Image (cartoon, grey):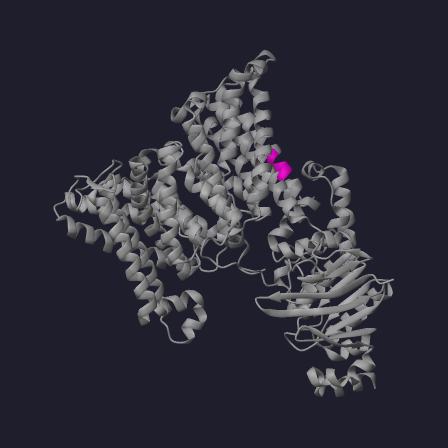
């Protein structure tokens, strides 16, 4: 039985997620794993926006910020449960994306990149300056999700890192599944078509502006949920979550692995999440390494790491 | 009743009138060719009709409705389809995907349904796929279906664009130099294809430099020179029109009258 | 009234720096069609190298000169290693390359230098001068003068010298320029050296006022970019006007509205320009040919 590439991707992900813990030297690795999954979730959204539809955003961390601060602010201010805050945060991010996306997506290339960068920085500036509301640059605390306690009550005993590993992994799997469904669907084809030629896409009846906006909103929701998960597991948020470095890391992770593919992007998320961990002793070299990786991969392995490795294995030429 | 009518259409770039006061119309099943020397404004005319340029004067009517300046995707939804002189293929998608995208108006549905991979979404994709495969067969590209479009030859890509344009089930089809870069055999195949499509009721507007083809298949010819219409009529009368010969046909006039032989 | 004058003067000072950074963007954009997100790092390097060379014992003018020359060399290396090798790559890739370069340079700077804020003495002292009812630092006058000298000098270079016109020709049409015998490699090297050198000079001039650390590049780059966009990407005259305008708007915002959000002005400007007049004040409208 041959697997479709969608099924293969999901199988690889499930296998990696389920089997990796067997090799964990300590419980700490669950934490790293869940960070990779959370980043992978955000980056899967970027794949839809940039990989499928070809639109660059250097400000998507702004939506992660909205999702994260929603979980910090809504429970104490409005009395909602953190899980509901996460949903509301996603709805808010989607709405903001809709409003901001309509004008912004009329731009292309560098102009779109800088406009989106501006949006992201404005969000992080507001989060940083409105100290009375958000705790300013030092950030604020985030309430406990409470789901682990519920599971404990049902007899499923997980440590905190294990619980977050599983929950983040679950979110990533669903997110990846949705993105993979999208790829081969009519909507996905419309996105890929407008990436290839906006003029021709319009000629076959695709409402290019509406399609771009869809991709923008969907990817904003992915980023928002990732931000919320991060906030809930760290029990803490700072404005950095919306900062431009985070946006750039997201795009780099997507492009590093191969921006057209979900698996490649998750792979990229893995690499860049592990980088600071690997470099703990050489912490000050982190920026140097990050910058170097970004340049080298983009210059020499333009399609990203995964496709380049794949074609190396297949041998040059079809 | 004309399916497409162009009335006094004009556009300027800087101070230059690229197209000035051009009018003609198409009926269902009719093949109308627009000819003229290079730079006569033929592609500009196409771009105005298909919503890529906004005309500065005049009107375009589709089925009686004024569609002047309407966006391309809205025109597509009203049954207007086109191909491009400079090929606008979706390079990194497969040949099959390119034509499936052509079925967009039939296969589109709610994004949520597509995200969730619901059976209704998959049915729509399957319908588009079978439609696409039969169109690929019609243009002779069925064996290339899974190949990346960017890898195909120029002549094949021209046929691919036609297949994609046909996927719309258009009432009016604009073909911008469909036989350019094709050899004699390929040209004849395209020739037959165009005649078939017209026989099925589609109105076809053609820009073409291959005079043999133009004279052979056109019901009606419109001649442009420096952006203005200098003649129109059936192939026989146009090829004898002294203004036309003077502007452009010259040695090709003999070619054309030989073709009608 | 004198308060407004104060804001205007400080606005023109910081605007002069933005104008120089915008000019750097413009030169590289004209030469290679690339928006160089690492432009701000040249400013940072100008300041930082001067600081450490001076601390190591070099007299200040020599330290500054060394900083400018070294940074120009780094700009040339950046072009050869990163930009030229990525010729024809999609926009996303080029953006990541230049941002990656910016991060890399910052990373190296924090290791080679350190993470602190630094300054060195101003050229003619720190006693404020009274001007038009307000006070201005002598260094600010040097900054404004420096910007004027550079802009005038480059204007003369591009319009009156053969080499300058060759650079313009290359930016207009690369292949045609090659066909008439212009050495493209040399033009590219020159453009990047100029752009980096100008950025470094801006850094040298402004450090006695605003200090410098390894991280100043980002904000400076974004504001320089906003200025270039405001004036019209690719137009040197636009870079000057755009920079001064942005500096003034920022300063007036900080003074009369909110000093916390003064950095937001640049982004509001970018967004406003992109939506209202994408070609900027002096740019040309472009059309797609199908």
Query: Which region is colored magenta?
Result: A175-179
* Rendering quarter of residue A47: top right
| Image-based side of C76 in relation to A134, left or right | left
Nearest the eye: B219 or B143 = B219
Tell me which residue sits at (22%, 51%) in the image: C67
Nearest the eye: A200 or B4 = B4
Percent coordinates x, y for residue C29 in the rendering: 41, 57
Nearest the eye: B8 or B89 = B8
Position of C72 relative to A291 (above/below): below
Percent coordinates x, y for residue C19 in the rendering: 34, 50
Tell me which residue sits at (52%, 58%) in the image: C285
* Rendering quarter of residue B120: top right
| Image-based side of B260 in relation to C158, left or right | right
Nearest the eye: B109 or C123 = C123
Dominant SS of magenta comes to helix
Q: Quadrant of the N terminus of chain B?
A: bottom right
């Amino acid at each position: 039985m041959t697997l479709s590439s969608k099924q293969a991707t999901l199988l690889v992900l499930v296998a990696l997620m389920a089997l990796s813990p067997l090799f964990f030297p300590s419980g700490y690795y669950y934490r790293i794993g869940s960070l990779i999954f959370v980043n992978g979730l955000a980056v899967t959204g970027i794949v839809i926006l940039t990989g499928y539809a070809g639109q660059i955003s250097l400000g998507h961390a702004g939506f992660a910020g909205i999702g994260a601060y929603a979980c910090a602010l809504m429970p104490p201010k409005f009395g909602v449960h953190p899980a509901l805050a996460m949903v509301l945060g996603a709805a808010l991010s989607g709405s903001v994306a809709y409003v901001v996306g309509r004008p912004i997506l009329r731009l292309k290339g560098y102009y779109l990149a800088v406009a989106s960068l501006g949006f992201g920085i404005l969000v992080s500036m507001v989060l940083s300056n409105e100290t009375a509301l958000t705790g300013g640059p030092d950030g604020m605390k985030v309430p406990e999700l409470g789901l682990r306690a519920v599971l404990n009550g049902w007899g499923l005993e997980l440590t905190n890192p294990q619980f977050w590993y599983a929950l983040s992994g679950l979110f990533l799997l669903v997110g990846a599944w949705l993105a993979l469904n999208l790829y081969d669907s009519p909507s996905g084809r419309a996105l890929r078509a407008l990436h290839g030629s906006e003029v021709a896409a319009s000629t076959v009846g695709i409402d290019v502006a509406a399609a771009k906006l869809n991709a923008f909103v969907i990817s904003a929701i992915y980023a928002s949920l990732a931000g919320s998960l991060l906030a809930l597991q760290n029990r803490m948020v700072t404005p950095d979550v919306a900062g431009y470095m985070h946006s750039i890391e997201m795009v780099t992770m997507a492009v590093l692995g191969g921006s057209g593919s979900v698996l490649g992007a998750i792979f990229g998320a893995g690499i860049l999440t592990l980088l600071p961990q690997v470099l703990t002793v050489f912490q000050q070299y982190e920026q140097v390494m990050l910058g170097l990786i970004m340049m080298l991969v983009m210059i020499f392995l333009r399609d990203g790491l995964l496709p380049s490795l794949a074609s190396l294995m297949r041998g040059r030429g079809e | 009743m004309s399916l497409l009518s162009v009335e006094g259409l004009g556009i300027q770039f800087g101070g230059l009138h690229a197209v000035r006061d051009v009018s003609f119309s198409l009926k269902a099943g009719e093949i109308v060719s627009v000819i003229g020397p290079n730079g006569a404004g033929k592609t500009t005319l196409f771009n105005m009709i298909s919503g890529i340029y906004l005309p500065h004067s005049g009107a375009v009517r589709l089925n009686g409705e004024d569609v002047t300046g309407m966006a391309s995707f809205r025109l597509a939804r009203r049954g207007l389809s086109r191909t491009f002189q400079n090929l606008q293929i979706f390079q990194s998608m497969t040949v099959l995907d390119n034509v499936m995208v052509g079925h967009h108006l039939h296969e589109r549905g709610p994004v949520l349904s597509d995200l969730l991979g619901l059976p209704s979404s998959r049915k729509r994709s399957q319908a588009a796929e079978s439609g696409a495969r039969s169109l690929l067969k019609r243009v002779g590209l069925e064996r290339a279906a899974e190949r990346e479009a960017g890898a195909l030859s120029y002549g094949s890509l021209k046929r691919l664009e036609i297949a994609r344009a046909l996927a719309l089930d258009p009432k009016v089809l604009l073909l911008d130099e469909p036989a350019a870069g094709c050899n004699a055999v390929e040209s004849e195949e395209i020739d037959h294809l165009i005649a078939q499509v017209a026989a099925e009721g589609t109105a076809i507007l053609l820009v073409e430099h291959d005079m043999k083809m133009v004279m052979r298949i056109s019901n009606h010819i419109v001649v442009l020179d420096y952006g203005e219409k200098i003649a129109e009529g059936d192939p026989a009368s146009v090829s004898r029109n002294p203004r036309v010969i003077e502007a452009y046909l010259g040695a090709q006039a003999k070619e054309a009258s030989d073709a009608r032989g | 009234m004198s308060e407004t004058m104060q804001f205007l003067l400080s606005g023109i000072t910081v605007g002069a720096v933005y104008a120089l950074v915008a000019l750097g963007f413009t030169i590289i954009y004209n030469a290679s069609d690339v928006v160089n997100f690492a432009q701000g790092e040249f400013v940072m390097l100008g300041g930082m190298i001067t600081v450490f060379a001076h601390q190591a014992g070099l007299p200040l003018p020599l330290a500054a000169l060394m900083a400018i020359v070294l940074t120009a060399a780094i700009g040339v290396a950046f072009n050869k290693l990163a930009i030229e090798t990525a010729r024809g790559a999609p926009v996303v890739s080029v953006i990541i390359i230049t941002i990656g370069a910016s991060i890399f340079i910052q990373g190296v700077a924090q290791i080679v230098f350190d993470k602190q804020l630094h300054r060195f003495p101003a050229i003619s002292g720190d006693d404020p001068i009274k001007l038009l009812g307000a006070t201005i630092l002598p260094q600010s006058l040097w900054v404004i003068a420096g910007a004027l000298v550079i802009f005038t000098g480059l204007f003369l270079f591009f319009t009156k010298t053969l080499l300058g016109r060759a650079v313009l020709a290359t930016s207009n049409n690369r292949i045609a320029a090659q066909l008439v015998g212009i050495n493209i490699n040399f033009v590219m090297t020159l453009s990047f050296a100029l752009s980096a050198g100008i950025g470094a000079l801006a850094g040298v001039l402004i450090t006695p006022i605003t200090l410098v650390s390894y991280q100043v590049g980002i904000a400076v780059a974004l504001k320089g970019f906003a200025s270039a966009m405001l004036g019209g990407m690719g137009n040197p005259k636009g870079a000057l006007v755009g920079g001064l305008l942005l500096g003034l708007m920022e300063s007036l915002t900080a003074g009369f509205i909110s000093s916390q959000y003064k950095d937001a002005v640049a982004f509001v400007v970018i967004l406003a320009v992109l939506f209202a007049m994408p070609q900027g004040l002096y740019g040309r409208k472009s059309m797609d040919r199908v």
